[in-house]
Amino acid sequence: MSRIIKSSLAETQDLNRTIGIKKIQQKIMVQEHLTPESRMEISKQKAQNILEEAERSYEEMTARMAKERSEHEAFLENSKKEWNGQVIIERDEARKEGFHEGYEAGLIEGRTSYESLLDHARETVERSKQDYQQRVESAEPVIIELAAKMARKLVGELLKENKEAWTVVLKGLIKEVRDYPEVKLYVHPYWYETTLNAKQEIQNVLMHTSVLYIYPDEKLSENGCVVEFPFGRIEGGMDSQLNELKEKLIETIGDQNDEH
């Protein structure tokens, strides 16, 4: 009986391994049929999704904090109503008992205490508003920067897995200056050899009379690149595109804060 159970378990494990291998093989076949442009677009979309998820997290956080502030203000309002009710009750009781002097003294004391409570409530609400705003403003850059780092890491890994995508990025940048007679392309040393190997493919994007020079520049970020032409320079690469997305996100959040 134990041999039969062991045999069944072994067959089940072999079947699971076979299914897992088939799924991996299918995933690899799908990836192999994607063009570099498609892979690059998928990478950019994943990066965009990360930044959008950061924006959603930020909006959820601000909504939660606004709810907390609203609940706090409601608590203060209820406390105020309860205090008013207590003052009325005490005043009526004093009047019924006929203690005029005690009633007047109690009323004055109650009014003083009530005004003191209101002042304290106003200060508490004001501090809550200031704390709320500070927490929101301090959280914005942290959330966005973390999202940008995650997106940058994701894109960097995808570029290293599929170096043809790097060539696609460079060709897109070179198209911007294809009409100039001389073009200088600067890349990080990590990508220098890969870029040299793809020089002819990149050169084909330029006009036939244009000359392309490629230089390594260790000052650039790993996935950054710069094109120089007679009338200026253009920064490119995935890092610059992610920075642009990050700036747009910061601008969007800033506009939302101004509206509030």
Image (cartoon, helix red, strand yellow):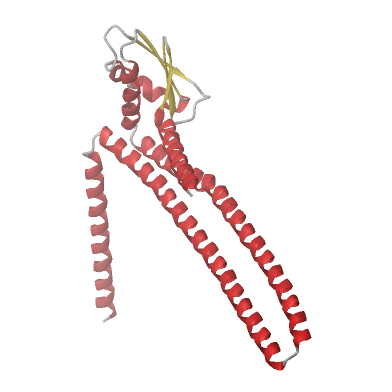
Tell me what residue is drawn at x 67 percent, y 84 percent.
91
Percent position of residue 145, x then y: 50, 43
- Image: 246 above or below 174: below
Location of residue 26 with respect to 237 vertically, above or below: below
Q: Front-most of 16 and 96?
A: 96
Residue 75 position within the rendered picture, expressed as x and y whole percent measured from the top left: 57, 71
In the rendered image, which quarter is residue 237 located in? top left
Q: Residue at x 57, y 56 (%)?
A: 132
Percent position (x, y) of residue 85?
61, 80
Give the residue at the far bottom of this rendering: 97
Report the number of discs. Answer: 0
Q: Quadrant of the N terminus?
A: bottom left
Q: Position of residue 98 (x, y in %)?
A: 73, 91
Front residue of 130 and 242: 130
| Residue depicted at x 25% and y 68% | 12
Q: In percent of the image, x 56 and y 67: which residue is there? A: 72
| Above or below: residue 130 compared with residue 116 | above
Q: Residue 127 versus residue 226: which sits nearer the camera?
A: 127
Residue 155: quarter of image: top left
